Image (cartoon, grey):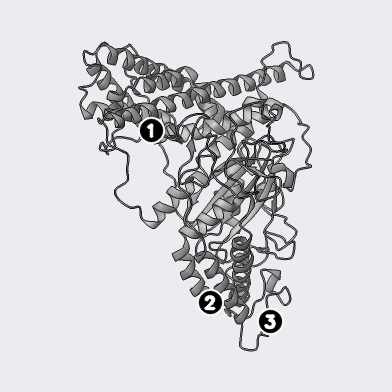
Amino acid sequence: MGPKKRKHPSPTAPTTLSELITEMKSFTRWLSGSTKVKKKSTKKITSCSGIGYGSASTKKATAAAEKKQAAAASVENENDEIATTYFTSLVTLLKSEKDGGESLPSSSITVIKTFIAYYLRNDSLISIGQRKTLYSSLLTSLEYLSDPILTSKFFSTTNVDSPDILNLLKKLGKQAQVFKSFNSKNLPSIDPEIDVIGDSSKNEQYNKDSNNIINALAISLHIETTLYSLIGGIKSAQEIGIMEKNVETIEDDDDESYITQMSSLSFSTIVGLQRNHTFKNSPTTVVGSAQSRLLRISSEISTLTTSLPLYPSSSIFLRADDTRLDLLSFLITGPEGTPYSSGCFEFDIVLGPNYPNEPPKVKFLSTDSGRCRFNPNLYADGKVCLSLLGTWAGEPWNPKTSTLMQVLVSIQSLIFVDDPFYNEPGYDVKNKSLEKQSTKYNSQVRAATLRYGIMDVLKRRGGIWRPVIERHFRLRKKEITSQLSNWSLRIRDGYDDKTPKTIAGYENLVAGGGIVSSVKEFEKDVEEVRRLIEGLQGEKDVIEIGSEEKPKRKKGEVICLDDSDDNDDDDDDDDGDDNDDDVIICTRPKITTTTTTTTKTTAIKKGSSTKDAIEL
């Protein structure tokens, strides 16, 4: 639904601070009433409708949609001009106040923060870059608030009724870091003389895409500098005693604790991920516009950094190669209540040279070296069957509307389901004669999840997923222990007493899924998992990035990566070995990771002290 036809607030610059507060409040209400925002649903997905599937659009519908988009863009431009005026006026009027705004009542501060929060909730850096004038004025006003006295008023944790604009800015800061890392090394040029196969429309599109990337990079840098300023202001206010220390006094419940502690591991870039990647030899020659593809990929990935599903019941973790952003790996924790519950399942994905005109390619890696089939849609050879990928019947990939997020969430919600047996074509859940087979199938998949999705993962727990694996199982220890007890009681589900007392194997499987395991072997695996989980140690709370005092480490262990020098390849250390001293080598051969195993990601400029850390 488009904006309501209501009179706009006056776009003229307010002359007093009280007048500005009144207009901001009115304008925020107008904006909120003009756009209906759908809340994220936590309802469990039980059918194929929704994620990953859509309906075809007619030419008439497409034209109507484009007309609506143009009208909405026009309204957005008008609104942005008004908001820019307000942000600019905020700094001017605060400066003109005798006390610099120190006497602002909490109600006025709430109005200002609500107005700022409205725009900070935009999670697309490309969109923000396209509205550069507006967001530059917003960030400039935030920088002004970094004065310790104003910071103590605007960012006090006691003001619980106001939006947490610092946290919103931190989320954008995380996106900005990722977007910069993907695009700064491939900064596009804008050249009106460039010739793309003699096609002027392609020239125009190339320059438009290049402009979008450059604007997003510029705004990314501004976001980071603003964040540094605000954190500095908060620290100063705390040091002089006018602002309380930001210390949690109430313990989170288990679910909140899981989300809080796992959030820093949700996404990271990996140095050398491509070396062991399934698709490392995939072609890199781009089909069509290279800038358009780069823009689409970097935009999607930067958005994913703050929007990946993260819940104790099931989460998705993503890793990207730091130089080839088309190569990614992801890990899904099996959804609660399914035969995959609490297991860790790994995938590799490539966004091919014709992406997004062609869907990504995905390979499932948790197959016991090609022997175990976990699902009718997950073959033992790693093939992933999904309509979005063009490997399954159903609604295909749409270059304009389909996204990487849809692929990830479709695998999580449409493949890792309660009764995977019915994912097989022709097996109708309404057919009661298939219930016993489905029950047996689930028993087989539970045995496979226990052995290959939990036990083997805990034994190996190396490489890029080590921090995720260790923290996931440590935080879910109580729930997993209870789950194992329940599974032990159900190991013979669907089988009668005549079932051979076989060890885990791949013979006599229902629909070829999972493994067959005897009660004795299953219990042996359960006890081993309990022992492994009990042996998990707590993690060090802070690992510094690029600090001069490096933490002690074992040979071959990953801690962090200092990427403060853009010319690392040209730097030679003096210790006689072939390693860059700023990079600690990973336990997985030839891979290093920039992800730290901390509750919060802490960025520290090289040469700075730990008290200068900025948490993102």
Write the residue at 49% across / 44% down. Answer: 264
Question: Residue tagged by mark 3?
Answer: 502
Q: Position of residue 291 (x, y in %)?
A: 68, 25
Q: What amino acid is found at the position of numbered circle 3 in the picture?
A: Thr
The residue lying toward the viewer, choosing from 431 and 101, is 101
Q: Which mark is residue 488?
A: 2
Q: Residues within 10 Å of mark 2 (few under 14, many from 20)?
A: some
Q: Is residue 556 left or right of residue 243?
A: right
Q: What amino acid is found at the position of numbered circle 1 in the picture?
A: Leu
- Report helix, strand or loop for mark 2: helix
Q: Quadrant of residue 232?
A: top left
Can you say whether 176 is above or below 433 in the image? above
Q: Which mark is residue 166?
A: 1
Q: Residues within 10 Å of mark 3 (few under 14, many from 20)?
A: few
- In the rendered image, is residue 215 in sight? yes
Proximity of marks 2 and 3: CB atoms separated by less than 8 Å: no
Q: Position of residue 457 (x, y in %)?
A: 61, 61
Sequence order check: which comes first, mark 2 or mark 3?
2
- Report helix, strand or loop for mark 3: loop
- Return the residue found at the far front: 575
Q: CA distance from mark 2 to mark 1?
A: 47 Å
Sequence order check: which comes first, mark 2 or mark 1?
1
Q: CA distance from mark 2 to mark 3?
A: 16 Å
Image mark count: 3
- In the rendered image, is residue 48 in sight? no
Write the residue at 27% across / 30% down. Answer: 110
Q: Position of residue 558 (x, y in %)?
A: 61, 46
Write the residue at 61% across / 32% down. Answer: 298
